[in-house]
Image (cartoon, rainbow, N blue to C red):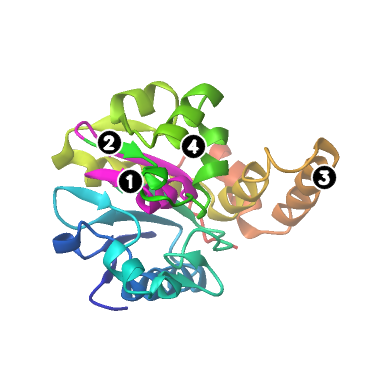
Amino acid sequence: MSEAVLFEVVEPHVALVTINRPEARNAVNAAVAAGLEAAVDRAEADPEIWAVVLTGAGPHAFCAGADLKEVSAGRSAGLATERHGFAGFVRAARTKLWIAAAQGHALAGGLELLLACDMAVAAETANLGLPEVKRSLVAAAGGVFRLPRALPKAIALQMIATGEPIPASLALQHGLVNAVVPAADVREAALGLARRVTANAPVAVRESLAIARQALVLDDEALWRMSREASARIKETEDFQEGPRAFVEKRPPRWVGR
C-alpha cells in the first residue's frame, strides 16, 4: 500500500482501509487513487477477507472529494485509474462487501465513494453532499445517478442542483446510511456491522450481493437468471452442507468460504 491509503486486517475476515490525508481533509490525489485501487485488489485477492470498512483519517472529513489543487494544476487525470475510475474505486467490480465509515463530512467525490460502498455509517455531525455545481463541475463519478437511486427523487435532485448538503440525520431518515452514531463511535459501529455480515456464509453473501447490486439496473428476467445460477453454484460449496448440519447439531456454523 502507500502512506496515502492504509490497509489493516483488524480482526478475522475484516479489513480496515483508511484514506490518510487528514491535512487535506482526505481529498483524493493520485496517491489516494493508486492506494485505493491497490486496496480493492488486495481485498479481492485474499480469500480470508470477507468485508472491508472504508474510512478517513482525522475527525473532520471522511473525504472532501477531488483535491482541487490537483485539478487547478491540470493534474485531474491522476485522480482516477483506468480500471477502477475516480479514486481507484467507484467503478471497481468488487465481490467483497464494503462499508463506508464516515467519521466526518462526505462531500463531492467523498459522497461518491460512500455511494459506491454497499453500506454506510455516519457521524451525527457529518454532512453529505454533492457541491460540484458550485465549482462548475459535474458529480460524474457516480453521484448524479447513484444518489437518485439511494434517496427520494426530490431530495436527490435538490442536493444535485443546489449543491447543498444534508445532515446525517436526514440521510438516515431516507436510507442513505445504515446508522448514525457519535463521531467517536463510527469506526466501531461500522466494524460491528461487518461482524454481523461475516457471521454468515461468505460465498452466499457474495452471490447475494452480486444480484442485489443489479436490482435497479437489470430487468426481472435477468435477475431471475442470476438467482438460479447463484443457487446452483452455492449447492456445490462445502458451506452449503455446513449450514444445515450446524442447525441440526445446534452449534454455530464453521464457514470455510468454499
In the rendered image, which residue does mark 3 sit on? 222
Residue at 75% x, 48% y: name it. 231
Q: In this rendered view, identify the residue nearer to me: 4 or 17.
A: 4
> Which SS class for mark 4?
loop
In the rendered image, which residue does mark 2 sit on? 127
In the rendered image, which residue does mark 4 sit on? 250
Depth-wise, is mark 4 or mark 3 nearer the camera? 3
**Mark 1 neighbour class, 10 Å CA radius: few under 14, some 14 to 19, many 20 or more:** many
Residue 7 percent coordinates (x, y): 30, 69
Measure how far apart labels 1 and 2 are at the Cα level: 7 Å
Q: Which residues are magenta?
A: 102-125
Residue at 39% x, 68% y: name it. 36
Q: Is residue 76 magenta?
A: no
224 on left or right of 76: right
Q: Is residue 108 magenta?
A: yes
**Mark 4 neighbour class, 10 Å CA radius: few under 14, some 14 to 19, many 20 or more:** few
